Amino acid sequence: MLLPQVPWEDLRYLFGEIMYGGHITDDWDRKLCRVYLEEFMNPSLIEDELMLAPGFAAPPYLDYSGYHQYIEEALPPESPTLYGLHPNAEIEFLTVTSSALFRTLLEMQPRNLISSEELGQSMEEKVKNVLDDILEKLPEEFNMAEIMQKNSNRSPYVLVCFQECERMNILIREIRASLQQLDLGLKGELTLSPDVEAQQLALSYDIVPDTWSKLAYPSTYGLAQWFNDFLLRCRELDTWTQDLALPAVVWLSGFFNPQSFLTAIMQTMARKNEWPLDRMCLTVDVTKKTKEDYSHPPREGAYLHGLLMEGARWDPQSGTIVEARLKELKSMMPVIFAKAIPVDRQETKHTYACPVYKTKTRGPTYVWTFRLKSKEKTAKWVLAGVALLLEA
C-alpha cells in the first residue's frame, strides 16, 4: 500500500502566504518567511535527518509530550546561528542596545548637570561652542542660476545633480536660520520657543535636531558624525557642479535620493539604445579596484563606491559573497560597475538578490536590489540577512 504524499508546497503556501505570511507587509520579511519554510518544510523532515539548527536534528516520530521533552532537552542555547545569522549579528544587537541605554540615561539627567565638568562649562556654553563651530564650517548655498548656465545639455545625470543641489540648499538654509535663531535666544535677544529649546537640547546631547533630519536624508549618526558626513556630501556636489560632467566614480551614499541616480543610468542607456524603459533592469559587476584606480567614467553606466556589506563579505579573489569574518560587522565593497540591460538578458543563475538600504535601520530606507554572484545557496544569505548599506 502506497503512503499518501505530503503536499509540502501546499503546506508552505498555507503558512507562508495565508495563515502567517498574510500578516507580513514587508516584501523582504515575506521572502525570509518563505525561505524558512522551504528550509524546514520539505521531504527530508520525515525521510532523512534534517538539521533544524547546528547540533539540533529534527525529532523522531513522537507524541505531543515527547516533542515537548525532546525540545527541552536537545534545543541548544539561543544564539544567532540558530536562525541562520552570523555571530556578528549579536555584537551589532548588543552595541545598539547599549547605545540606546546610555543615551536614555543621559537624557534622564537633570539639565543643570549636563555640563562638561572638567572644562567647567554650562549647558549654554557648550551649545554655543557647537553652534559657532557649525556656523563657521557651514558652506554657502549653491548658486542654481549660475550652475544651470554651465551646461545646456539636460541629461538625466545633470538633472539629478540639479535636484540634489536644490535639496541641499533647503537643508543649508534651515540649518543656518535655526542656528541664528538659537544664537539670538542664548544672547537673550529672542524668547526661546519650544522648537528652539528642543534644538538646544539636541545640540547638547549630540543629536541631529528634528527640524534638520526632516529635510535631510535617513541617517543613524550622532550630530558630530552627521555634520562631517554632511560636509563631505556638499564637497562632492560642489566638485560635480564645476563642469556637470559625470564623476569618474560616483559616491552613491552621498545622494538624498540614490534611486534617482540609478534610474538615470537606465534612462541614459534607454535613450542611447532606444530601448523601452519598462523592460530594462540594472545589472551590477563588482570590480577588484578602488575609487583611486579610476580617472574617468565608463562609456555606458557608472562606477559606484561607498557601499558596505552587512551579514557577509565580498571576496575580490573569487568574485563572490563569502562568510563574514568574526567581529568585522561591515565590510567595504570595491567599486561597483552598474549599467542597464534588457530584462530578458539578466543573469539570475548563481546570484543572490541583495537589497540595498540607506542605513542599517533597513525597512523604509530600501533603495534597490543588486544581483551579486554567489557559489552558495541563496537561502544561506537570505537567512543571514545579507544586505548592502550606504551608511556605516
Image (cartoon, helix red, strand yellow):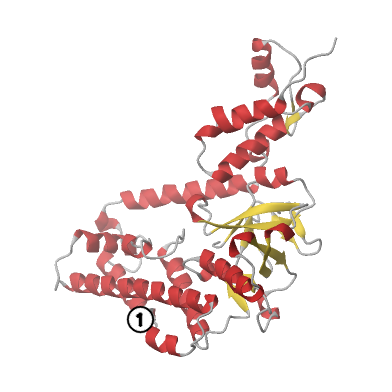
Amino acid at circle 1: Glu
Residue located at (60% from left, 74% from top): 271
How many marks are shown on the rendered structure? 1
Pinpoint residue 39: horizontal percent, then vertical percent: 71, 34
Residue 62 visible in the picture: yes
- Where 297 sits versus 11, above or below? below
- Where 64 sits versus 257, above or below? above
Residue 73, quarter of picture: top right
Residue located at (76% from left, 17% from top): 60
Pinpoint residue 137: horizontal percent, then vertical percent: 39, 80
Residue at image mark 1: 136
- Where 24 sits versus 96, above or below? above
**Depth order, front residue of 176/201:** 176
Quadrant for the N terminus in the image: top right
Residue 86 visible in the picture: no
Residue 127, quarter of picture: bottom left
Residue 21, quarter of picture: top right
From the viewer's perspective, is 218 left or right of 247?
left
Pinpoint residue 252: horizontal percent, then vertical percent: 56, 69
Residue located at (81% from left, 22% from top): 47
**Depth order, front residue of 220/239:** 239
- Where 209 sits versus 294, above or below? above
From the viewer's perspective, is 287 left or right of 362?
right
Pinpoint residue 347: horizontal percent, then vertical percent: 75, 57
Identity of the residue furthest to the right in this view: 1
From the viewer's perspective, is 240 left or right of 69?
left
Quadrant for the C terminus in the image: bottom right
